[in-house]
């Protein structure tokens, strides 16, 4: 899935830096989508979107109610983001306050309400959509355009000195709140977070407008050890050692994928991600080894897991799992803030990742529930200390869970490999179907989505999609974050290029693949651009590099052939991918962001997806998922590197044919032709046995034949 223009995708970012693959909202299917998709006709279009819907009249009334509430609370402005308390890429409808109040349901954007204005900031991907969805009450602030101020700059310019700006601290990232407060402090404008128990004024209006969607309440399920590959106890021991190094008493897991990975659980609360809404903390017990002469001094026994989750979400199997695996203590979801505050009051040191935590967690972990956000000139990521805490009560650095989760063990990789082969067979059957259909009729983008999802749903262990399918035909393919909408989507015919970016969640793995196809006679321009993208794809795939190499070092490998023709693409080349988890994770990636110094390491999964986009005409992207592996015999003590470093490279997970019809063969070197033929031979060998239809088999034979026969 494509990467955010000019923003690094090498980590799971907070919501205000959400990756570009955030898409227009679609119906919130549970992971039981498989059953519905399997029974659907492959020739009918998907059901239309069902976003958070309100009428213009309802939104106008809600806006008036919010303004009245802000007046009561003495607030000159209120900020409404898109996210949830866990800064999730895909928040559940329960948290989609901005969509409710504004009518704009794009996945990236922030609203501001003042006594006289209602404004929405969003980037260029969503300007057209916002123009169509915002009513007369709203002003669109087109980010990236000349003379359009940032949200903070606008508030600083428009609000009077000593004004108070309100926000809900449970849904804003730490760094956003701190940066906003610092900017506004120059004019003595204060930022006032709501109290954790205080009703969000948007929720008040939402209730009067017909009812806010309920909080997600799907049952937590156990993620089998045969897929997880490591017990919860083993993970706790590793993390306990990291906590010991930092002298931290408590480690907070604030994002949902961290909680799921740590506890070997999954859920159905979040669209496209197998996650359950919960917090978790690890607590190191006080001197268990010194208070006893027994041998129970290991990190596993010294460190205790506490999960904050609604009781109704835990069935008998999940409870037994948490008890057996780590003797986890279970507390109500909302107690996380009081728990941290009480711990700090008792002198405990809390480790909180400022990149992955909402501001309310920071308030609790610093013992600083002040009325307004304090600012200072220090380099600390945390607010000025309150009387009840000291700077030493906080550890401000990346969570150790992030890296451990990114380093896949052999069981996780085994599951990822198997999931990709099943997924590849489904896409082969789909491409065979599509090739046949477009020879005699036009196929809508929505039908493409529906048929591909239906074929995936028939595969073993299928749970749902890993993100909303991007099926962009012709000019729509040039819109990097395109999403087909009912009655507005394009069609693919024999002479139309299609960019198809899709993926799925399986019990044992997560997939993400992009193929660009043409089933007629592509133009020479299309063929040259495609071939140069392919050359960049091969450049990443075949890269060999010493250990310790950050992803940005490889980014030029993907762009060299494009640059040679004066072409480029405005997104990163690769993002991390979770194992039966989020389709986007960090801390690594491949992009032009030199600030991300995280080295690529053995076991990391990363996408390889260069592209090219001819505005108004066509789009091209070729994406495979790769695993970082050691290249045997090149480094170490027996190698020629003077620093005795190991050398690394990639193993391919994705096995789906690359369109030969789009290749300008004279541009490829002999080695590049050999690469393509070897890759297609692997696809035939590994995916061929899983293709179930005669049509799919016949199509695959042709698609994987040598390029030059």
Image (cartoon, rainbow, N blue to C red):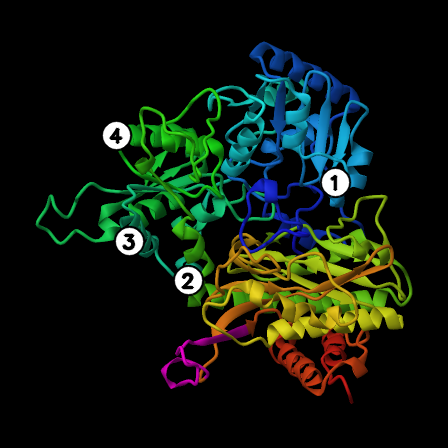
Q: Which residue is mark 1?
A: 49
Badge 3 or badge 1: first in the primary sequence: 1
Horizontal arrangement in the rendering, residue 289 relative to residue 366 (left or right)? left
Residue placed under numbered mark 3 in the picture = 241
Of the pair 429 and 109, the residue shown nearer to us = 109
Q: Nearer the viewer, mark 1 or mark 4?
A: 4
Label 3 to label 1: alpha-carbon separation: 47 Å
Q: Position of residue 562 (x, y in %)?
A: 74, 69
Location of residue 121 in the rendering, given as x and y in whole percent from the top left corner: 70, 34
> Which of marks 4 and 3 precedes in the sequence?
3
Residue lying furthest bottom:
709
| Precedes in sequence: disc 1 or disc 2 | 1
Classify 10 Å Cα crowding around label 3: few (below 14), some (14-19), many (20 and above): some
Q: Is residue 587 left or right of residue 349?
A: right
Q: Which residue is mark 4?
A: 346
The residue that mark 2 highlights is: 226
Residue interval drawn in magenta: 634-650
Q: Quadrant of residue 70?
A: top right
């Amino acid at each position: 899935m494509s990467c955010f223009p000019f923003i690094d995708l090498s980590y799971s970012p907070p919501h205000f830096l959400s990756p570009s693959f955030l898409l227009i909202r679609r119906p919130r299917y549970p992971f039981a989508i498989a059953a519905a998709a399997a029974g659907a006709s492959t020739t009918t279009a998907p059901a239309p979107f069902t976003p958070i819907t309100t009428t213009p009249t309802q939104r106008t009334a809600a806006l008036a109610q919010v303004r009245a509430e802000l007046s009561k609370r003495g607030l000159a402005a209120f900020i409404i983001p898109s996210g949830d308390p866990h800064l999730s890429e895909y928040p559940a409808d329960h948290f989609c306050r901005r969509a409710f109040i504004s009518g704009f349901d794009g996945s990236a954007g922030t609203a501001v309400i003042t006594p006289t204005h209602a404004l929405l900031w969003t980037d260029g991907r969503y300007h057209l959509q916002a123009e169509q969805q915002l009513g007369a009450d709203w002003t669109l602030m087109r980010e990236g355009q000349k003379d359009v101020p940032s949200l903070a700059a606008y508030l600083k310019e428009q609000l009077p000195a000593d004004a108070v700006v309100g926000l809900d601290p449970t849904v804003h990232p730490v760094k956003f709140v701190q940066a906003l407060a610092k900017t506004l402090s120059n004019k003595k404008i204060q930022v006032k977070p709501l109290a954790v128990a205080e009703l969000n004024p948007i929720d008040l209006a939402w209730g009067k407008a017909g009812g806010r969607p309920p909080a997600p309440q799907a049952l937590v399920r156990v993620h089998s050890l045969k897929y997880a590959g490591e017990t919860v106890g083993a993970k706790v021991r590793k993390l306990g050692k990291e906590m010991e190094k930092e002298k931290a008493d408590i480690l907070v897991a604030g994002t949902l994928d961290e909680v799921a990975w740590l506890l070997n659980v999954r859920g159905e609360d979040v669209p496209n991600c197998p996650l359950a809404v919960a917090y978790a903390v690890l607590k190191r017990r006080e001197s268990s080894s010194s208070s006893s002469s027994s041998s129970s001094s290991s990190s596993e026994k010294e460190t205790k897991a506490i999960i904050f989750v609604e009781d109704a979400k835990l069935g008998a199997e999940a409870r037994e799992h948490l008890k057996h695996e780590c003797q986890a203590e279970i507390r109500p979801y909302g107690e996380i803030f009081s728990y941290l505050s009480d711990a700090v009051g008792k002198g405990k040191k809390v480790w909180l990742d400022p990149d992955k935590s909402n501001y309310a967690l920071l308030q609790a972990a610093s013992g600083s529930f002040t009325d307004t956000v304090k600012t200072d000139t220090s380099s600390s990521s945390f607010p000025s200390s309150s009387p009840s805490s000291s700077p030493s009560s906080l550890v401000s650095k990346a969570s150790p869970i992030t890296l451990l989760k990114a380093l896949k063990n052999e069981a996780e990789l085994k599951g990822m490999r198997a999931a990709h082969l099943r997924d590849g067979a489904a896409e082969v059957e789909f491409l065979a179907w599509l090739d046949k259909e477009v020879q005699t009729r036009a196929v809508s983008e929505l039908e493409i989505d529906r048929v591909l999802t239906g074929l995936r749903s028939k595969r073993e262990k299928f749970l749902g999609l890993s993100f909303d399918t991007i099926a962009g035909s012709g000019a729509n393919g040039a819109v990097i974050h395109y999403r087909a909408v009912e009655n507005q989507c394009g069609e693919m015919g024999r002479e139309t290029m299609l960019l198809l970016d899709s993926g799925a969640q399986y019990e044992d793995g997560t997939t993400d693949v992009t193929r660009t196809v043409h089933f007629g006679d592509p133009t020479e321009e299309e063929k040259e651009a495609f071939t140069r993208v392919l050359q960049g794809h091969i450049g990443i795939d075949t890269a060999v590099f010493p250990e310790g190499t950050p992803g940005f070092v490889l980014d030029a490998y993907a762009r060299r052939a494009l640059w040679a023709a004066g072409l480029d693409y405005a997104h990163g080349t690769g993002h991390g991918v979770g194992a039966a988890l989020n389709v986007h994770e960090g801390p690594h990636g491949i992009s032009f962001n030199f600030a991300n110094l995280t080295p690529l390491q053995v076991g990391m999964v990363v996408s390889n997806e260069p592209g090219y986009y001819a505005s108004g005409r066509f789009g091209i992207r070729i994406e495979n998922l790769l695993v970082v592996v050691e290249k045997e015999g090149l480094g170490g003590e027996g190698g020629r590197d003077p620093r005795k470093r190991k050398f690394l490279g990639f193993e391919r997970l994705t096995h789906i044919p690359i369109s030969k019809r789009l290749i300008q063969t004279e541009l490829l070197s002999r080695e590049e032709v050999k690469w393509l033929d070897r890759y297609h031979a692997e696809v035939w060998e590994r995916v061929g046995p899983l293709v179930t239809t005669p049509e799919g088999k016949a199509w695959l034979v042709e698609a994987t034949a040598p390029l030059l026969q």
